[in-house]
Amino acid sequence: MKYTKSRNQRSHVKVAATALVALVISGLNGIAPVQASNNNNSINQQYSAGVPEQLLVPNELIVEVDPSMGYQNIEDLFKRVNATYYFPISSEAWHMKFANKTDQILAWQQLAKESKVISIGYNFKVTQCGNSAPVGSNAAGTVGSGQTQVAAGDPQFSSEWHIAAVKAGSNQPKPQINSFNGFAIMDNGAVYRHANQDSQVSMNCDIHMGGENASWGASADHGTMIATTLGAKWNHFATAGVVRDPRIVSARLSFDGKGEMTEVDLITGLGWAKGFICDGSTNYPSAMIIPLNIIPPYSLSNQAYHPAFHHVCKNIHDKFSGLIFLSAGNNGMYDASPRVDYINVVGACDQDGKLLQNSNRGKCMTMIAPGKDIICTQHSGQVVSGNGTSFSAAIAAGVAGLIHNKGREYGKFLKNTDIDYVLKATCSLKPASGWSDTTGYGMPDYKAATNALK
């Protein structure tokens, strides 16, 4: 289904159900509901598109329903289509399960005829977009050289070319200037080791089990590498990150840290993070880092397959001054999904500023950032070299946070849209046309951005 429906503010439906349901709804307050379409015939077209079964969680759907329909009527509708399970994951989106594929297909067909049903989509599996390798000797390149500021106690600093590539090795905002609300990593949790809330992974939330946990092991490996790429040296880790004193929160998306992560998990994690670090009343910006994706043409950039995900991202951007940084993916493929202004899709480049062969590219591209031989730290404290667009998304998000806090130091308050503009306008490696489907607007350049803010 194409994401073309208009959305108007309305009162949220009050769900008289379990406390957990109430928590989900309250955590997502402020997301503007969608006006239902008068013609939902296009919804059925997606089902016949032949999505490979291995990309999907069997017999599950994500269905957006106009909440003005009322909880009891929504429940009655889901019972009529033989759902064995249904649970709200946003103000409009519901996670639904069915006993078998036949019931799922029949439910899709029946739901598509309902005027109050806004969208129907599959529950896709999402994949981490990064991996690690032993630290080797990094070859010199044309970007990322000249790393001269020494980080005390970090013997790896001269090899952390990604910090120099985005010009973040010096002139960081003053420590007391930190009105960027924070960074949320959508992954499998992250290990943290510091007690100061202003410079740590300050919260891990297990979206399935609830609560905070600092002792996750190998399941938090990828998330810890992303967190330590973003900001780590000042968190008592072994390597430096792009941001000196970030506030990082992390959502653990898979059940008990095991098994696959899904689009339902991702939407739920974004809802939790929005409630934790986003602030719609003051416009203090924040960033969501999504180091996950799906192979094109079914990527998360494709609104047709992921309408509920796009609705949540758009509202975080439009209503809560949030920035979304999405890994382009590591399939080496062209993604024809159109670019949208509320999601920054980040590809990966090497030390010569060239797109990595396995980095996806395409119409959805916003920018590139370093994504090869990224020195970071695993959950165990082991220093490793990370590769992939996961790291690129974290680096780009880090520069966005630096731009906001530097603006504050200069007496300017930058909302998310202001940060987006400066980030894109001051990119290095900018194509002659201003944008291309290989590099987007180019690579973030913190030094050029700070000069533009003076």
Image (tube, rainbow, N blue to C red):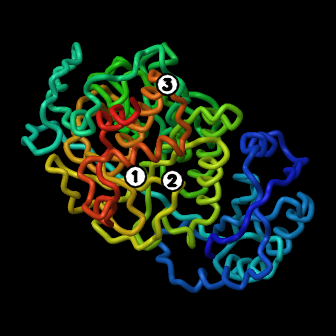
Q: If you read the primary sequence from the N terminus, does the residue marked by circle 2 or circle 3 appear first?
A: 2
In space, the residues marked 1 and 2 are separated at their CA atoms by 9 Å
Q: Amino acid at mark 3?
A: Arg
Q: Which residue is mark 1?
A: 128
Q: Residue furthest front?
A: 454
Between label 1 and label 3, give the one nearer the viewer: 3
The relative height of residue 212 versus residue 143 in the rendered view (above or below) is above
Image coordinates of residue 453 in percent, x first then y, are 41, 33
Q: If you read the primary sequence from the N terminus, does the residue marked by circle 1 or circle 2 appear first?
A: 1
* Displayed quadrant of residue 28: top right
**How busy is the neighbourhood of tag 3: few (under 14 within 10 Å), some, or many (20 plus)?**
some
Asked if labels 3 and 1 touch by Cβ distance under 8 angstroms, the answer is no
Residue shown at the point (47%, 77%) measured from the top left: 52
SS at badge 1: strand
Q: If you read the primary sequence from the N terminus, does the residue marked by circle 1 or circle 3 appear first?
A: 1
* Quadrant location, the N terminus: bottom right
The relative height of residue 452 versus residue 1 in the rendered view (above or below) is above
Q: Which residue is mark 2?
A: 261
Q: Which residue is mark 3?
A: 408
Asked if labels 2 and 1 touch by Cβ distance under 8 angstroms, the answer is yes
Q: Which mark is residue 73?
A: none
